[in-house]
């Protein structure tokens, strides 16, 4: 719903209206269009009495919007959201290259990989400290210690960090992590999403294994409804009946999300396929389809990785691939 | 891995062995078979040096078990697990009927429904206080207040309660809830599962929307690995391409889980179909296939329910259905 | 669309109307309700000019029906369709037990199995002569010779036959086969469906591996649109991401099809699971959910079967199961 | 199985061996490697007695190959298969652009579209004469007449034709159609595949709605086992739970098929998405991932198309897209 105010409205009355609207459980954004002030009302607007609102002195008229009363909707926010992280940005025409190990194993490992991928053109370092594993007996990550090692790698290279949070209780530990990742299994962990909406670090939401576009967007909406507008979407493959690959990359989600929402959309070919030899060709497809970035697992010793070695490429392979992707991204802009 | 001890082993040495094993990150169960003591070792046994263990004085020999070194495995625990809840029990040949509203709305509502379903033969009251909703703008449940109303209904009827927890931080609120439910969206919220493994209330784990049997069992394993053996599995339908129903009930999971594990298995035809008129025939199928119980949404005013009215049956319909299911369950025992 | 005629309409004019309607590519059924004659028009009625029809002398008025202008629709044919096959019938409250080998291998084999299942209560013999196999190098069935052996078994036992056709060109060979089966892979082989609509043997359509309820019904509609009203639906499991079972039985299809259509609905737990030990419990669930029958693979030597041995039960197991299912079916009628 | 012959084997004995092998139901390809003759034996080799074969005078030894005794396997045929069609070729580094209407509607329509897409760079004309429609009441295509109109368009433009066959009985009608398409619904219509294996026109097999990579390849194997080596694979999207798109393009199949088989692989973004506005970005992704070609629906009046208008792009849009794809394909070769 958009409430179009009369020209030069009385400020006090306008603020009273906003306060009242918020007490009805909706979100209000005031936007100025030329000399015109509009109040964009997001959320469950079905309980609001439109006639009552239109009868107020400050209100010119009310414009209902049928389906899309949402923060994530491109209709409310036609320009691309661009997220500044350290000295790099996500969205807005740039190509973000997030690279690093599935799991942080040691200082030597993570620093070596960070240096290598930085040299090859990576713009962010990804690394898991807390690992969601199907089995309780599998390696669960280094935890807090792993985050510390990531900080060392950031210090050494200047690369901003992206790492996965698994529970609300870990929020304090992530205070200085540049982008907080929500994993596929937690895409509908609503308490976690709400908590992330109340803090100010950018949040990257991986698509759930069988989530629809609608559900995925609604998870972003949970974060944005809390006041945090810095959300990144990450396609990481959906579950299908195919067993030769770990998941099935749904590349259509890239142009589809581009149309539905203003949020940046990136893709993760490593998890989507589970096979290192597929990362190259799929990364090319992802860039040519128009993604804002790629998340790639890079390990200096894939055969002995504690987690997901089969899908990690080596720093040498990343070096070659990053160059290709950068050139391809440049070419696509001119196409 | 099973460590077969020598006859009449030295107690101190045995305890030293157990302490050492636990320090290696595995679980140890001592079982007595005739005069023979076996130590069942569960978890990641791959790091244990079998030759080292066999060289100990108290040890006769070590028997590796290939695939199933798990608490949930029927091989380790051939008898059905039976869970005592208030004056009723789940598993062991009984038919558990959990009934109640999707969402607790008011004292009048939940008490009226509780009385009605109790009179019809329900053995437990289900009711949602915290509701995981796809949209942040949908009704999110009464929260803490909802749990209080459930307690009132328990007081009035004596029915034990089952209600859904959504986050580790809510654990204190659920201290006296008889069975704590983990919803489908949280099936792989591992921090929550670990926390539930460290407390002593029974836990009911709903199958994730696209979870395999293996993953579902592993979520139960997370709880059991923490020391809590009281786990119930609940089939609630999986996501398929069919759009006429909300989900697709995978009835095969009932006999399959019966074979793989000793844990009780129940089914929820309300969420599995999303349509009240399907609850009756599917409940009959579920009982005839051998489930330990059924979870059914019952609402005294489905058309005005704040949540999932379309799939709720009325107390009158439940009365008729509960009678049928009880008679069918009796008949199946004789068949 | 229903064309309600005026009382005692002129016969010639009525026939002219029917002829004209059929020339427009739709099907017309005349039904008499008290002294009232209605013309039920099925198919693409969107091209018919309702005002033109209503202006005719014999027509009282035209009643459009929005979504369901279909032969398969229960709205047009509220009573259950009952199909007479030999001295048995399918639908109408009876329980059809189709049993036999996946693939006919020899006279000795098929006759022995036929005798055994007949003695145990089977009402029809199933057996494959033409086998659709994923690999061109797998055993493709005995073909015409296999049909001959089935005829011998029918002669010996009196059991009517059901066998799968794979192509229009085989139609002549199936002239005296009592029920012609269309396999899951051919569910949308429209030329085959059309040809089966032009002959008069009953047709059993297995649900495609990823077919929706709607598509499955439309395949039945293809047969019925050709004039053959004797169609049976057979649920045989859909493809999901679960790998422990061959397919996933969608038991909900039984009550759902019961509501949407008047055609008999049976289920095949052998193909749905791919495991002999699951056939028993699922058959019980299928009967209790209200199916008109069950299709079960029975083999006298499952370990050496040329096809699908893993999912075949033995004649002894069938004997025990058939007794249980018959008693359960009787019990459900009284419930 | 590879039978390695002795140097300079006796020709008569070799031919006797080949004749005998073929009588055992397997396929034999003789290949010359330097002065060495190998017999590659494809099909069910499990029944062949290896010791018996090795005892023959002409045989040096027998080399069993574990999983892949198949014509489609890249192991047997390491070079890419290149298919010559008219004056164009499919595979071998070229980019095939198949474009045209979903359904042939009239001479004016198909000739106009053919001229337009030819001018824009299309290398083949696609057009449906026989249309597989879910509903028997939907437009079923112009049939034989439609093929005639396609021939006119070929005459006018020189573009080779690709059109879908629906049944063995139509084979004569397709004698001069340059590439015969097998639709997704017929991917496992084995009688049709066998018949296509016995004729000599190239065959394009669309992937079934829920077919695995393995099943899809096996359908190609059915054609090749009959002696026709000219097979093209076409990815057209799989069925998932997403409802915003018609299907889900599985772009991973492109590099995966490239590795498993030597056959050309192309993709159809029109059917994969069902939405015209997605065809552009996905086509870019398809080309960048390494496909041999693209199949695109082009209609001069999408809003009034008799079939699939929503997913057809206009000749103007195709003109712009074809230029981009050609430049992108050239760029990828240099990358």
Image: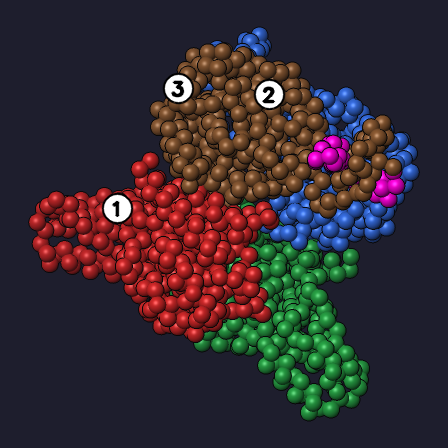
Chain colours: A green, B red, C brown, D blue
**2 and 1 marks on the same chain:** no
Identify the mark at residue B79; answer none if there is no mark: 1
**Residue range of the region highlighted in magenta in the rendering:** C27-56
What x and y, as percent, mark residue A150?
A: 47, 69
Identify the mark at residue C119; answer none if there is no mark: 3
**3 and 1 marks on the same chain:** no
Residue located at (22% from left, 53% from top): B29
User: Taking D215 as reference, is C309 left or right?
Assistant: left
What x and y, as percent, mark residue C1?
A: 76, 41
**SS for dot 2:** strand
Dot 1: chain letter: B
Distance between the alpha carbons at the discs numbered 2 and 3: 51 Å
Mark 2 Cα-neighbour bin, 10 Å: few <14, some 14–19, many ≥20: some
Q: Is the residue A176 above or below the residue D287 in the image?
A: below
What x and y, as percent, mark residue A121?
A: 61, 64
Dot 2: chain letter: D
Which is more toward the observer, C236 or D65?
Answer: C236
Which is more toward the observer, B150 or C182?
Answer: B150
């Amino acid at each position: 719903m958009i409430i179009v105010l009369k020209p030069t409205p009385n400020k006090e009355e306008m603020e009273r209206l906003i306060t009242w609207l918020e007490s009805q459980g909706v979100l209000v954004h005031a936007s100025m269009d030329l000399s015109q002030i509009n109040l964009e009302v997001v959320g469950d607007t079905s309980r609001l009495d439109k006639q009552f609102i239109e009868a107020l002195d400050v209100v010119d008229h009310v414009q209902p919007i049928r389906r899309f009363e949402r923060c994530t909707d491109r209709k409310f926010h036609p320009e691309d959201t661009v997220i500044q992280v350290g000295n790099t940005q996500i969205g807005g025409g740039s190509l973000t290259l997030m690279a690093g190990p599935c799991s942080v194993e040691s200082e030597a490992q993570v620093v070596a990989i960070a240096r290598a991928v930085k040299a090859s053109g990576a713009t962010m370092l990804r690394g898991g400290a807390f690992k969601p594993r199907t089995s309780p007996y599998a390696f669960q990550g280094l935890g807090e210690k792993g985050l510390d090692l990531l900080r060392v790698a950031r210090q050494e290279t200047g690369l901003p960090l992206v790492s996965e949070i698994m529970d609300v209780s870990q929020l304090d530990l992530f205070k200085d992590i540049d982008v907080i990742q929500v994993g596929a299994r937690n895409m509908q962990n609503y308490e976690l999403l709400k908590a992330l909406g109340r803090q100010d670090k950018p949040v990257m939401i991986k698509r759930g294994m069988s989530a629809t576009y609608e559900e995925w967007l609604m998870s972003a909406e949970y974060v944005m409804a809390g006041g945090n507008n810095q959300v990144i979407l990450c396609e990481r493959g959906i579950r299908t009946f195919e067993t030769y690959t770990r998941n099935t990359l749904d590349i259509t989600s890239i142009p589809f999300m581009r149309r539905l929402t203003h949020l940046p959309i990136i893709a993760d070919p490593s998890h989507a396929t589970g096979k290192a030899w597929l990362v190259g060709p799929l990364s090319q497809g992802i860039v040519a389809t128009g993604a804002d970035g790629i998340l790639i697992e890079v390990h200096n010793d894939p055969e002995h990785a504690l987690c997901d070695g089969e899908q990690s490429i080596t720093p040498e392979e990343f070096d070659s691939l990053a160059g290709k992707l950068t050139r391809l991204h440049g070419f696509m802009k001119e196409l």
